[in-house]
Amino acid sequence: MIFGTVIIIFICFILLAEITDGFFVDSLNNLANKLHLSQDVAGATLLAIGSSAPELFISLITVLRPDGVAELGAGTIVGSAIFNILMITGISVMFRSGKVHWQPLIRDLLFYGNAVLILFLVFQDGKVELVEAMILIAPYILYIFILSQWKKIKFETISSSPKAERLSFFSKSKTSIKIFGKFWNIFMFPFRFVVGILYPNFIKRSYVATFGVSIAYIGGVSFILVEEAVKLSEGFGIPHAVIGLTVIAIGTSIPDLFGSIAVARQGKVDMAVSNAIGSNIFDVLIGLGLPWTLALVIHGKQINVGLENLNSSVVLLLATIVVIFFIFIFQKWNLKRWSGLLLVFFYLIYFFSIIFG
């Protein structure tokens, strides 16, 4: 039974990646063009929603469930943030060292640090109330405003958006194929065939239809993923938060990892690092704040979240910000491969401490 659950979870991960990056992000990119949004604002809003849709839906589904598994969704968001900042940044730098622009990076680290600090304070009593959920959303509105004005403020020649070129991660090439070779293409054929059936031509011709259908598919697959994750947690006797922090967080973050590796191999390590940090800002502030707000408005009661595993992981998130900042300062914003290896090593320590702790 547990083996079947693992297989279903694995299939859900693949389907979410194919639906999100193959269709949903495309429809959002077209929508951004129709709305005439700047690259910075489009990247931080629509394309951020596209790349983080699985985490967002998982978070929403878990807080709306009546059986109290909100810590599974919260764990997924927090675990994904740790994976992004340590593994995605680390592996990207291991593939290609390079210099990063310090101005937008400092800006994003400050917003990210503020988001994690707010989350840490919210988790202190093990429950979330409506005001706390709304406080999480507010900084992201300010973040979007600053992005919209960034080039006017000072740094006109610097590409500043953490998500502005998100679409290029997957539109320029099938990243996973380049990394794993033709075997991956063969392995993925049945999954892409199924997803292709789900998107007939009359849907693909309309970005509005593609957007709506993608929302339905992502929601459905995320619902199945949550159900199977709960079974896996109960089957192994592992807390829901731990499954979210590890298995689900890694599975939903793999597409971002592939995308960051692709752009790092093209020499754009700056974009790869920005992608990781930008994803975290959205995940923490909107991926938790929005589902919590909706659930509290609908149910009208507080949301209980686990304390032990989540608190320690949020503390680690705060620590990673300090570590990343000092690594950048020490290397004068010119990242070396050894720093990537160090970040990956830190993540492995975290992963095994969560699993066996």
Image (cartoon, rainbow, N blue to C red):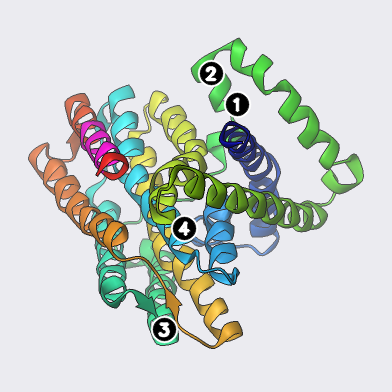
The magenta segment: 344-353
Q: Amino acid at mark 1?
A: Lys
In this view, the mark in front (3 or 4): 4
Residue 352 magenta: yes
In this view, the mark in front (2 or 4): 4
Most distant residue in the left direction: 330
The image quarter in which residue 109 lies: bottom left
Horizontal and vertical percent for residue 357? 24, 44
Q: Amino acid at mark 4?
A: Leu
Q: Is the Cβ of the residue at disc 3 closer than 8 Å to that at disc 2?
A: no
In this rendering, does residue 161 appear at all?
A: no
Left or right for 219, reference 125: right
Please give the label number shown on residue 129.
3
Q: Which residue is mark 4?
A: 72
Q: Is the Cβ of the residue at disc 1 closer than 8 Å to that at disc 2?
A: yes
Mark 2 and mark 4 lie on one chain; the one further toward the N terminus is 4
Residue 121 magenta: no
Q: Nearer the viewer, residue 84 or 292?
A: 292
The majority secondary structure of the magenta stretch comes to helix
In this view, the mark in front (1 or 3): 3
Mark 1 and mark 3 lie on one chain; the one further toward the N terminus is 3
In this rendering, does residue 330 appear at all?
A: yes
The image quarter in which residue 19 lies: top right
Q: Which residue is mark 2?
A: 178
Left or right for 128, reference 38: left
Horizontal and vertical percent for residue 191? 72, 29
Cα–Cα gap, marks 1 and 3: 42 Å
> Which residue is painted at 22% across and 31% down in the image?
345
Mark 3 and mark 4 lie on one chain; the one further toward the N terminus is 4
Cα–Cα gap, marks 3 and 4: 18 Å
> Would you call the spot at circle 4 few (<14 residues within 10 Å), some (14-19), or many (20 or more)?
many
Cα–Cα gap, marks 4 and 1: 31 Å
